[in-house]
Image (tube, grey):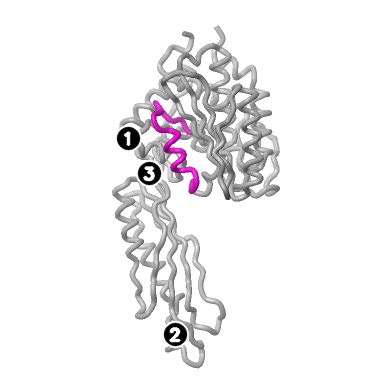
Amino acid sequence: MQTAYDYLQQHAALILSDIKRLVQAQSPSLNKTAVDSCGEVLQSMMAERLDVQAQVFPQEKLGNHLLFSVGNGQEVTSILGHFDTVWECGELEMVEEDGKLFGPGVLDMKGGLVQAIWAVRALMQTGKLAQQRIQFICPSDEELGSPSSRKWIERSAAGSLRVLVAEPAVASTNEAKIARKGSGRFEVKITGRSAHAGNNPEDGISAIQEMAHQILALHNLNAPQAGTSVNVGLANGGGKINVVADHAVLGVDLRVTNMAEAARVEAAIKDCQPHLPGSQVIVTGGMSRPPMEQTPQNLALFIQAQQSARRLGIELKGKAVGGGSDGNFTSALGIPTLDGLGATGSGIHARDEHIIIADIPLRAALIAEIIRGNERSDA
């Protein structure tokens, strides 16, 4: 009897063609027109490959979110896959060479999304989908921190037996991502008082000098031993070189491994106090993604995925990583979540972003086997 892997190997060229088609539909997160056009390509692909129509969730400023449902079973497996990218239209070309496909969003994460579509198609075509329902949750703003999709993702995933995230595998090792850091974004606005830098500097309060104090204080919150990183990634202030600056602003990124550390450091950032008499410091923002921790539910799903991988003759390993994904949200709800099940390759958010073409059928088959659970692959 034909296996899902057999089917996927036979259709490897078509899968690659679909990946190219989705990559060519460029979709920078802040370009609603482009993202929605990409969403239409995705809808067309879902109709062709899985015979399903999308539930469209319109957004005013960002791209529309898409939800697809396949099958009628009681047990629901949700597959998470965003279709926005960090690249502006025309910024990167799609190129195939040396067994690799390069292009905007090909690894993060259009390749993995297409592989997941074909994994479900393979189960349907080989009669192994059984009494399950597969739900594709496809947000349009993951690269922005999911500002418009978080609550929608949480509602859509509620009641799922498990969530499989088709984000790329760990570069070079092809490991699954069994834990991710949570992230926070903060803005620190500093107000001073302007004055002439030559005639009467003593009448001014330098917002830039206060900014320097704040940067040092924020970086002192770093705790590498706990996996906590605080980074001031943006710093702007002042206007003219001969004027004591009366304004400055900082952009702060926070990464943590657990919610206790998130609460501690978030409170410390929000409690930033001015060092210079008369200056003002106002902090806004907060945690945007909870950490994806190694919960017992997540560990059990990973062990099951390892068993599924062995049926394909591969040993699946797992790794904790620093970046976040939409899987952080579903894990925080207590839904068993496993990440990094998408394409192999390297160069996430880099100009050499690419996938390994030869790995496509096997990676798609891995998702198919995980969906089947602990059944025998020849059943």
Q: Position of residue 206 (x, y in %)?
A: 44, 79
- The residue sitting at 47% across, 78% down in the picture is 246
The answer to which of 172 and 187 lies nearer the viewer is 187
Question: Which residues are drawn in magenta?
Answer: 146-165
Distance from Cα at disc 3 to Cα at disc 2: 43 Å
* Residue 55 visible, this orientation: yes
**Outermost residue toward the bottom?**
199
Question: Which quadrant of the structure image shows residue 109?
Answer: top right
Q: Is residue 306 above or below residue 325?
A: above
Secondary structure beneath dot 1 equals loop
Count neighbours of disc 2 (C-alpha within 10 A) and say few if under 14, some if 14 to 19, many if 20 or more.
Answer: some
At 60% across and 32% down in the image, what residue appears? Answer: 356
Q: Residue at x 59, y 50 (%)?
A: 30
Give the image location of residue 137, x and y in percent. Answer: 51, 33
Label 2 sits on residue: 204
The three-letter amino acid code for the residue at tag 2 is: Gly
What residue is pinned by disc 1? 295
Whether residue 241 sits left or right of residue 160 in the image: it is right
Badge 1 or badge 2: first in the primary sequence: 2
- Say which residue label 3 marks: 291
Q: Are marks 1 and 3 in contact (CB under 8 Å)?
A: no
Secondary structure beneath label 2 = loop
Label 3 amino acid?
A: Pro
Whether residues under marks 3 and 2 lie with C-beta atoms below 8 angstroms apart, the answer is no
Residue 313 visible (yes or no): no
Residue 298 horizontal/vertical position (percent)? 36, 31
Q: In this rendering, is residue 72 above or below 206?
A: above
Residue 84 in picture, x, y percent from top left: 58, 43
In space, the residues marked 1 and 2 are separated at their CA atoms by 53 Å
Instruction: Determine whether, in the image, residue 231 is placed left or right of residue 107.
Output: left
Q: Is residue 179 magenta-colored?
A: no
